[in-house]
Amino acid sequence: MRHITILGAGLTGPLLALYFARRGYRVDVYEGRPDFRIHGFVGGRSINLALSDRGIRGLAEARVDEVVMRDAIAMKGRMIHHVDGETDLQPYSRSGRHINSISRGGLNITLVNAAEEHEDVHFHFDHTCTGVDLERRVVRFRRGGEKGEEVEREVDLLFGADGANSALRQAMEQEVDDFSARTDWLSHGYKELEIPPGPNGAFLLEKNALHIWPRHDFMMIALPNPDATFTCTLFAAMEGENGFDSIKDDADVLSFFRSHFPDALPLMPTLLQDWRDNPTSRLGTLYCEPWYVGDWACLIGDAAHAIVPFYGQGMNACFEDCRVLNEVLDDSGDADWGDVFREFYHRRKPNADAIAELAVMNFLEMRSKVVDEKFLRKKVIDAWLANHFPDRWAPLYEMVTFSHLPYADALAQSRRQDALLEEIGYDRVEEAMEMGEEKVKELLFDPDTQR
């Protein structure tokens, strides 16, 4: 049985280790950070994550879903906060299905602990990968901080689960002739803030919702935590009007929030401190191909396809990677890893590209379209059609979030549906809806209907 080396003990690496351990492999996972179960997540990201059906299925097939879901908070819809303080809830699903707010740090610890229960899984913290020699199949590490000793490890099978700045991917860029990679940066970045608990540990906003303050060119979101805090994230342009570069001091911060988020400002007593302490970070989408080197090295998760966070599918897509790789091994066996890597890549690459496109599209939806009359009108039509013709029609969000339909297929089906609605016209569809199912069926689904 071949030996697995995984770079990165973020979210993807430990789950991948779990899958391999269940298949009987010996696994070593290397992570540059000190053991965060002891030292915490100093300097790391703590943005909450939206866990939905794809991610849960990935966890379930590794038999770790139940322990993860204990700390999850159901979010039933988007709570839209208007400038005048009014709010309205837009449910995620016509059938009451929900997504789940979950702590990145808590989830990371849970996955590492679960993987480490297997005697053949070993984590090596404080091992910063300083390079991968693809010709010699050797990985170099600096152990114990910036002045630590340099060590080398020969590898048999290597997986780069080390995120958007993957050391394996960087080596592939330098040494593999037919490999290509690029990052498409958004003009927007983000800054993390917080809403603390109220008196007696009360939630100051609706607990079971993802809160959005859409302001067209920028927005703020807030996700609930079990301790009654809300992790808030402001997304704005890096430069220009209402951009991060225009907010220069405490007075600018307060003025900005009074103007655009007046209902949130009284709930954020640490706003100024959070603004000073938390970095402003950029947002980008990573594209690369192919994801593998021969029959011994492969990228997975964000190392292969990091995306912007606006569809809440980044983590879910990474967990789906692990499940699909395991599925490929079930289908083909593990005798020829070159074939395994090729099949995994061909199954996942079109879907990674599709969710990357959807995530950028959803940024526009969240910051602007959720208060757009045509968008809201289309949501009503989508929901009606899905209720009456569930085998023929599904809203895009539900296909992505509450099904296991490949992302690329969901995007293609949504485009066909949108084109049909545009061709017929919203007015005619709404008139048919008032007349009942048979009229709508004749208008939309009868191939003999003349449009």
Image: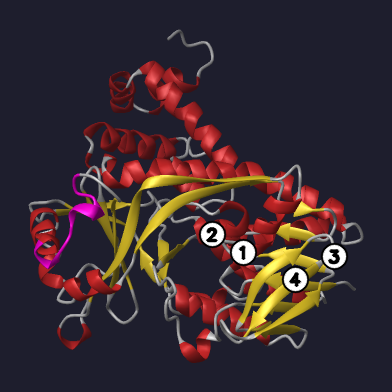
Quarter of the figure with the C terminus = top left
Q: Which residue is mark 2?
A: 316
Which comes before the other along the chain, label 1 or label 2? 1
Q: Nearer the viewer, residue 190 or 226?
A: 190
Q: Which residue is mark 1?
A: 58
Q: CA distance from mark 2 to mark 3?
A: 34 Å
Q: Is residue 248 magenta?
A: yes
- Provide residue 294's location: percent of width, then percent of height: 84, 53
User: Which element is circle 2 on?
Assistant: helix
Q: CB atoms at circles 1 and 2 under 8 Å apart?
A: yes
Q: Nearer the viewer, residue 315 or 42?
A: 42
Q: Is residue 35 shown left or right of residue 308?
A: right
Q: How is this picture coloured?
A: secondary structure
Asked where in the image residue 436 lies, by quadrant, the reply is top left
Q: Is residue 233 shown left or right of residue 303?
A: left
- The kind of residue tagged 2 is Asn
